[in-house]
Image (spheres, rainbow, N blue to C red):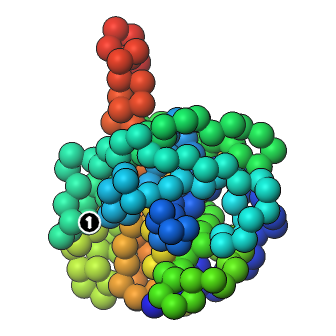
Amino acid sequence: MQGRIVGGYTAAPNSIKYIVSLQSTRGQHFCGGSLVHRYWVLTAAHCDIGAEHMMIVAGDYIVNAFEGTEQYAKPHRLVPHPLYNRSTNNADIMLIKLRAPMVLNKYVSLAPLPRQGTGLVEGRVCRVSGWGYNSHGGGQARFALRTVTVPIVSTARCNSSESFNGNITANMICAGYRTGGKDACKGDSGGPLVCSGRAYGVVSWGNGCGDAKFPGVYTAVSKFRRWIDQTIYGSYLRCTRY
C-alpha cells in the first residue's frame, strides 16, 4: 500500500512546523502527529505500536533524509483515549508524552487547538498534511511532506445511506470533495486537519482514499479538548476552574 496524501502537492520546506513523524525504531515513518506542547504529541489511538517501538521526529521535511533541522524524542508514555474503540474507530485519539521536550524554533512550533465543543460548518476549507506512505520494500525512498485542502462535509451527508451509513459518531468529522480525488491516506493517520490555524481533526479512517462517496474521517479534536488539557496539565489544573 503506497497510500499517501491524494490529489495534493508538496508543502514548502518546513512550512508546517507543528507536524511530527511517528517512526519505528528502524526509522520507518508510519503515522503523523501534531506537537501540542513541548512535551506532548497529539495523534490517533490506532497509531499505538507501543512506546518502546517508537521514535518521534519534529522539524522534518523529507523523511528518510537527514536535513539537520530534525529533533528526535523517545516517548515516555502513550495515553490512548479510554473510550477508544478499535472496531468503530470512535475516540481515535492519543497523546504521547515525550521523554525530553522539543525545542521550539523556526522549524518546530506548536499546533493551536480548538476550544471544547466548537464546531465546523459544512464547506469550511481545511488543510490536511502528511508523509503518508507505508514503506513496504520502498523504505529508502525520499518523501517530502505533502498537503491538500479539503472542505468539511456535514455529518448528516457523511452518515447517509449513500456514504458511511450511520457509522460516523459525534466524535468524528468528515472532509472531502463531492467529486473525490483529494484526501488523506494510509500513513497519514494521526496527522492534523487544520482549519483557520487550529488542529480541529486527527486523520482517523476512511473507505479507500479520495473516493467521491466516502470523504476522509477525522477525530473531532474539539470534543476532546478538555481530556487533552486534563491529561497534559492534570496535576496543575485540579484546583483551577475553567
Residue topped by disc 1: 89
Residue found farthest to the top? 239
- Judge left or right: residue 16 versus residue 128: right
* Three-letter residue code for mark 1: Asn
Q: Position of residue 152 (x, y in %)?
A: 51, 67
Which part of the image, by quadrant, shows the N terminus?
A: bottom left
Residue 199 appears in the figure? no
Q: Position of residue 19 (x, y in %)?
A: 62, 56
Q: Position of residue 78 (x, y in %)?
A: 35, 46
Q: Position of residue 18 (x, y in %)?
A: 64, 50
Count of numbered tags: 1
Q: Residue at x 50, y 56 (%)?
A: 55
Q: Residue at x 25, y 60 (%)?
A: 90
For residue 225, what is the image quadrant? top left
Q: Residue at x 72, y 71 (%)?
A: 65
Location of residue 39 with respect to 106 vertically, above or below? above
